[in-house]
Amino acid sequence: MTELVIKSDYKEQVSSLVKSALEREKKVISSSIETSQKKLRDFEKRYQLSTADFFAKYQKGEMGDGADIIDWAGEYKMLLKLEDDLKKLEEIIVAG
């Protein structure tokens, strides 16, 4: 859990603004996660391989270095980062 303490002469307004901004950012990240998941499903369908299996093989150097392979690995890394960012934002508690 992360506690964000607001100290301001306008505590209520600033707290509300910060909470709204956090909610908007969570929505943006959630939307990006959905987009990334769709792209990964497209790769999985095209190559008949789950992303988890792909990435394990990729890390062992068994998938080559074609453009699609690099894009797939990059998309998966992006998804992991987005999911981590969302988790961190969801743990924030705004306190006065």
Image (tube, rainbow, N blue to C red):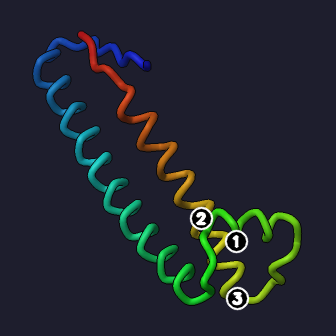
> What residue is shown at x 52% (from left), y 85% (from top)?
45
Horizontal and vertical percent position of residue 9: 17, 12
Residue type of the residue flagged with mark 1: Phe
**Of callouts 2 and 3, the N-terminal one:** 3
Label 1 – label 2 distance at C-alpha: 10 Å
Residue 27 as seen in the image, left or right of residue 49: left
Residue type of the residue flagged with mark 3: Ala
Proximity of marks 1 and 3: CB atoms separated by less than 8 Å:
no
**In front here: 21 or 87?**
87
Residue type of the residue flagged with mark 2: Tyr
Residue named by callout 1: 54
**Of callouts 1 and 2, the N-terminal one:** 1
Which mark identifies residue 31?
Answer: none
The kind of secondary structure element at disc 2 is: helix
Residue named by callout 2: 76
> What residue is shown at x 56% (from left), y 61% (from top)?
78
Instruction: Answer with the quarter of the image where residue 22 lies.
Output: top left
Residue named by callout 3: 67
Crowding around mark 2 (Cα neighbors within 10 Å: few <14, some 14 to 19, many 20+) is many
